[in-house]
Amino acid sequence: MYSSIEEEINKAEENSEKVMILGDFNCKIGKIIANNKEEVTKGGKELLKLIRQNKLMVINNHRKCKGTWTRIQNTQKSIIDYVMIKEDDEEGIQIMEIDETKEITPYRISSELVHSDHCAVRVVMNWRLVWERSRKKKYRVDIKKLKECRDRQALVDIAREKGDIKKKYTKWQTELDKILSKCMKRCKEKKERKTKVLRDLMRARRRIKRENKKSRSTEEKRLRQVQERLISEYIIREKRKEDGIRIKETAAEIKSKGGVNGAAFWDFFKKKLDGTKSNNMVAIKNKEGKIIENVKEIRREYEQYYKDLFILDKPEDKVGKLAEEINIQYQKWMSLGGTRKTEKIQIQRSRSIQEVERAVSKLKNKYTPDSQGINNIMIKSMGTEMTESLALLIGQIEEELNTHPRRMGENENTITSQKRKQIRIRKQERNIYHE
């Protein structure tokens, strides 16, 4: 059974397909699953071997798995049903539910409802996410093509349109995605080191597969399947041999540098533990302006700073600050020629293209993309069209934020009797709440 499962996994890998193995394996694999019993049966050992060889992971042990026991009969509980996927596909797991309460588990009707002793298992996978991540690794944006691309004026045209900023931004984002998709380039894949023996074995397996497709007799097909299985076993062994050779090479290199007790070996680990220079502590100034270089004192200073930060202000101080802030805003409003009626005022001016260009030029040359797949180099290489469209979008956002109507210095005579009633009711409600 396990050899046939392995065959299916190999076929899926060759056809670049995704793998999910699930079912009643009727075996116990012990403490590999949290809160499970320690017992490991003969079938369990075979299953663990399959998991190791094919780099699989058991989702029963994943943090997104709800429920533990897959078989419940009276008081006896056990885990014998498993769901497995490739380790690389872990990010695609959305949820796994084991129906211990028997809400969706199948049943038969006799004098009463009789449920199956096995609990139903529900798994939700986002294969699209896995595929997109793998595609991102294979493809990247070609900067030369991006510089030559002439469809970028469309971004400026969208930014100049009138209307809701949210709709406009989504339209702008889709247009940008179109431009980037045109400039995609396939990454060079690192080829595996293969020995002559391994290459010959793989060639032989491909030949057997081709012949198997052409043959019609069932006996010949069975024989070729056996041959294919044996060759795939030899391939696995050969790969392990290669791994062993690499380990020996690294061990010899460590020995040449003085072995485990050598200075070079421990220097390497010291660097790993200390981290980069950016992680090391830098000298700081305290409240008095004194420079502190001692690590313990720096930590103490940081602790004190964060303690003071989370101390809440007294209510009197808050009221005073708020009154001061309102007064400053009112003075600004009056200097702009405001009257006692409500007006739309703009305190900050919208960003100019020169300001955005200055900000873009200061960006570091980083290739790491954000959640939408855009990095600093892309923004820099797209030139004036990108900065102009960004300036227009940022300008509209600031305009909408700053020109919001405010009731600053409104005269009491303008308040209607209806509004007075509403204010009185709110005051009464507040007093009742406090009492």
Image: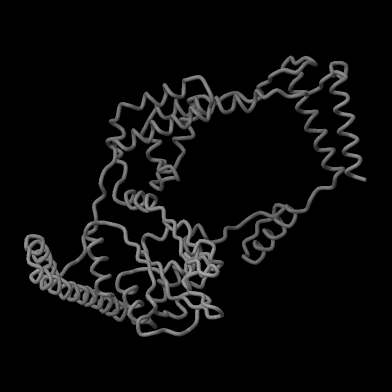
Q: Quadrant of the N terminus?
A: bottom left
Return the residue nearer the eye: 430 or 244.
Answer: 430
Q: Residue 423: name its quadrant.
A: top right
Residue that appears at 43% across and 30% down:
172
Relative vertical location of residue 177 with respect to residue 366 in this rendering, above or below: above
Relative vertical location of residue 144 with respect to residue 98 in this rendering, above or below: above
Relative vertical location of residue 230 with respect to residue 199 in this rendering, above or below: below
Q: Residue 296 in the image: state x and y as whole percent.
A: 65, 67
Q: Residue 205: name its quadrant.
A: bottom left
Question: Which color scheme does this rendered protein use?
Answer: one colour
Residue that appears at 31% across and 41% down:
141
Residue that appears at 75% across and 27% down:
329
Q: Residue 297 in the image: state x and y as whole percent.
A: 67, 64
Residue that appears at 36% across and 51% down:
133
Return the residue nearer the eye: 364 or 433.
Answer: 433
Residue 244 relative to residue 127: left or right: left
Q: Quadrant of the C terminus?
A: top right
Relative vertical location of residue 118 with respect to residue 388 in this rendering, above or below: below
Q: Residue 332 in the image: state x and y as whole percent.
A: 74, 23
Q: Residue 102 in the image: state x and y as whole percent.
A: 53, 66
Residue 209 relative to residue 326: left or right: left
Residue 367 relative to residue 292: left or right: left
